[in-house]
Image (cartoon, grey):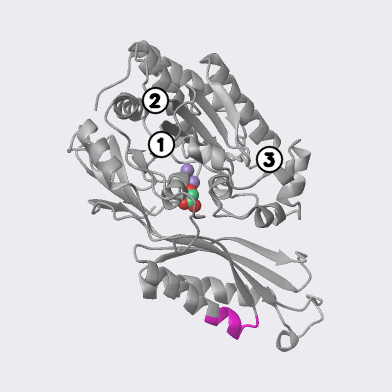
């Protein structure tokens, strides 16, 4: 994989250093960059600054996703080539998941300009808002709302753990919550989207180091999030006999074990990464437990079977389970994937992933979409330990530059699908290439 020029690599490093302190916890070294917070505001200002520095036209869509355009996308509907990713993080997330794609995208613009290239098609850099859903619970809220996969009313009514609704958080951030919704205008501009992302498993680390700094994404596992509410009765920790208790914590513990067992039984992965006990007193029996479930797997019916077995377990305990989000199996555009492979060389591995991305939401909504993954030597992600070697990040920029160069000047873009549907569950995915590697990250 080739390298960018010293000037482009230096500019990449400058942007990387600028982002380093934003939302970083001194105690853990992880990032807390949540939607509609002060940190989010700082990141959006940074994006606007990088856009202005390059003379790009910054637009914001109905959900607040930021788009920085080189060339006027309204002059060429359906022809915009879009790159970028997101800047938010999971709680105590790593530096790379999201920002690597945004910083690389700006560096690609620098590289193309250094080459004197004049694009035939508009080129856009996007910062999708709230990709991780860390605050309001629904992942990829930015791309889901503009494609209609998440309805505006439902989005406005999502609440964070402090009970603040998204509508209220939008108001506090100075935005009008009534504006959010499906955005035809933003979608019409997009001809294709290529999201560069840090790899979130270690499939590439095990391959030939000389040729495997970058992979081409082929598909995303079906995945979703559910909320489980379990009942209890508050009572005194010292005076209530064990046999008299209705302890929601015990039910939650049983559910956590059931989640692990059902995932094993159905060959899926399932995670309880967030749990809340109310009222949360050390000396009071819990009156309510909320358990959040994330389930994914290579085979959609297996994921569904896992959740349905768990739903039975919840019912047996007098609880309630509700789906917070669902993304079906996603295949990236076969034509676009082949084109990336032709540009980069067929030695570049093809990689499926268990991680969710805005690219998957746009693909499900009918837009030609593909991804590039940059090698992660440990495979660790959603953790302060997440890492990619600087040299591999630069190789990612070089690979994305070659891809974009081809897309903005080369043959016609792949045809867009029908983007008038919501992209919600049930839309049949387009046929995709077979996957060479699978990275259940
Ligand atoms: C997003 O990173 C996800 O896969 O949950
Ligand atoms: Mn992530
Ligand atoms: Mn991501």
Q: Position of residue 187 (x, y in %)?
A: 50, 40
Q: Is residue 371 left or right of residue 339?
A: right
Please tell me the numbered disc located at residue 36. 3
Q: How many marks?
A: 3
Tag 2 residue: 121
> What residue is rendered at 67% in x and 32% in y?
41
Q: Residues within 10 Å of mark 3 (few under 14, many from 20)?
A: many
| Residue 121 colored in magenta in the image | no
Q: Are marks 1 and 2 in contact (CB under 8 Å)?
A: yes
Q: Residues within 10 Å of mark 2 (few under 14, many from 20)?
A: many
Q: Is residue 30 at all visible to an observer of this figure? A: no
Q: Position of residue 328 (x, y in %)?
A: 43, 60
Q: Quadrant of residue 344?
A: top left
Q: Position of residue 65 (x, y in %)?
A: 58, 37
The one nearer the camera, 74 or 151, is 74
Q: Position of residue 152 (x, y in %)?
A: 65, 52
Most prominent secondary structure in the magenta stretch?
Answer: helix
């Amino acid at each position: 994989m080739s390298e960018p020029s010293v000037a482009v690599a230096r500019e990449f490093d400058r942007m990387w250093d600028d982002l380093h302190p934003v939302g970083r916890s001194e105690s853990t070294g992880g990032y807390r960059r949540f939607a509609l917070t002060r940190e989010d505001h700082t990141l959006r200002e940074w994006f606007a600054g990088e856009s202005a520095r390059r003379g790009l036209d910054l637009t914001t869509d109905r959900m607040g996703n930021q788009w920085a355009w080189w060339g006027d996308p309204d002059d060429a509907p359906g022809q915009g080539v879009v790159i970028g990713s997101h800047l938010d993080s999971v709680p105590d997330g790593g530096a790379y998941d999201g920002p690597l794609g945004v910083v690389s995208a700006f560096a690609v613009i620098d590289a193309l300009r250094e080459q004197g290239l004049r694009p035939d098609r508009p080129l856009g850099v996007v910062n999708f808002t709230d990709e991780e859903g860390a605050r309001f619970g629904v992942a990829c809220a930015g791309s889901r709302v503009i494609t209609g996969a998440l309805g505006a009313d439902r989005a406005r009514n999502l609440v964070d753990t402090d009970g603040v609704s998204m509508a209220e958080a939008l108001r506090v951030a100075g935005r009008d919550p009534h504006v959010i919704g499906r955005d035809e205008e933003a979608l019409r501009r997009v001809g294709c989207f290529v999201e560069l992302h840090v790899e979130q498993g270690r499939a590439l680390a095990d391959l030939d180091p000389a040729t495997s700094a970058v992979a081409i994404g082929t598909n995303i596992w079906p995945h979703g999030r559910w909320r489980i509410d379990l009942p209890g009765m508050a009572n005194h920790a010292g005076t209530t006999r064990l046999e008299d208790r209705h302890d929601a914590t015990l039910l939650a513990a049983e559910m956590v074990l059931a989640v692990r067992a059902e995932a094993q039984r159905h060959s899926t992965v399932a995670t309880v990464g967030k749990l809340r006990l109310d009222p949360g007193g050390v000396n009071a029996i819990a009156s309510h437990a909320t358990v959040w479930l994330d389930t994914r797997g290579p085979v959609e019916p297996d994921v569904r079977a896992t959740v349905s077995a768990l739903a039975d377990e919840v019912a047996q305990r007098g609880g309630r389970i509700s789906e917070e989000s669902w993304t079906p199996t996603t295949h990236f555009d076969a034509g676009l994937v082949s084109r990336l492979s032709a540009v980069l060389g067929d030695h570049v591995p093809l990689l499926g992933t268990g991680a969710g991305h805005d690219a998957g939401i746009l693909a499900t909504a009918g837009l030609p979409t593909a991804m590039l993954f940059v090698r992660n030597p440990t495979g660790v992600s959603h953790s302060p330990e997440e890492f990619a070697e600087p040299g591999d990040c630069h190789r990612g920029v070089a690979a994305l530059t070659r891809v974009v160069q081809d897309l903005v000047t080369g043959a016609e873009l792949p045809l867009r699908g029908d983007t008038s549907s919501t992209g919600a569950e049930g839309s049949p995915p387009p046929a995709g290439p077979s996957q060479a590697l699978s990275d259940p990250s």
